[in-house]
Amino acid sequence: MPARACSRSRWASRRSCSSSRCSSSTASTRCRPPSPSAGGIAAIIVLLLASRMTGSRAGVGFGWLLQAAILATGFIEPFMVVVGLVFLALWVFCFVKGGQLDRQNAARRAALGED
């Protein structure tokens, strides 16, 4: 089955779509929108990899970059600003509390003479 030109929609460009992305009907040929699950799955994989990297300075910087990317998705979906702000607050809280715990543990080790 040859590829057909897709009808103009918000997903279709001026070029024709491949036959796997178009569904033909008797009335017209329409393109399916891109699958949002592919982007979601890729985001999950990147976020999981980033969570394993937070022990290094590069990993922390990458985490801040991902926080900015999550906030930037608010331009696409406005509710993502709320989600991004919640995750940003959790990220900052973890760094503040983690620093406090590190200082407390260092003081405890120094008092016991373990270092």
Image (cartoon, rainbow, N blue to C red):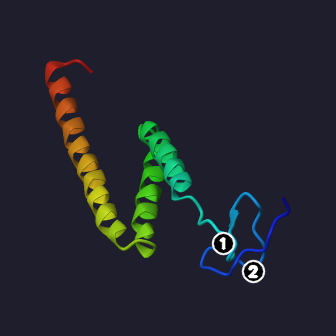
* Disc 2 residue crowd, few under 14, some 14–19, many 20+, Cα 10 Å: few
Residue 60: percent from the left, percent from the top?
43, 48
Residue 50, horizontal then vertical, whole percent: 47, 44
Q: Quadrant of residue 81?
A: bottom left
| In this picture, residue 101 sits left or right of residue 65 | left
Of the numbered discs 2 and 1, the one sitting upstream in the chain is: 2
- Tag 2, which secondary structure? loop
Image quadrant assignment for residue 6: bottom right
Q: Which residue is mark 2?
A: 14
Residue type indicated by callout 2: Arg
Q: Is residue 35 left or right of residue 17?
A: left
Q: Nearer the viewer, residue 23 or 58?
A: 23
On screen, 115 above or below 74?
above
Which residue is painted at 73% across and 57% down in the image? 20
Q: Choose between 10 and 106: the one closer to the eye.
A: 10
Q: Nearer the viewer, mark 2 or mark 1?
A: 1
Q: Which mark is residue 30?
A: 1
Position of the N terminus by quadrant: bottom right
Q: In the rendered structure, are the residues bearing label 2 and label 1 in contact, judged by CB atoms less than 8 Å apart?
A: no
Q: Residues within 10 Å of mark 1 (few under 14, many from 20)?
A: many
What's the residue at 42%, 41% (across, down)? 51
When asked about the image quadrant of residue 30, the answer is bottom right
Image height check: is 49 above or below 31? Answer: above
Q: Residue at x 28, y 48 (%)?
A: 95
Task: Name which residue type carries label 1.
Answer: Arg
> How far from the left and from the top, in percent, is residue 114?
23, 18
Mark-to-mark CA distance, 2 and 1: 13 Å
- Per the image, label 1 sits on a secondary structure element best described as strand
Q: Position of residue 69 (x, y in %)?
A: 46, 62
Quarter placement of the C terminus: top left
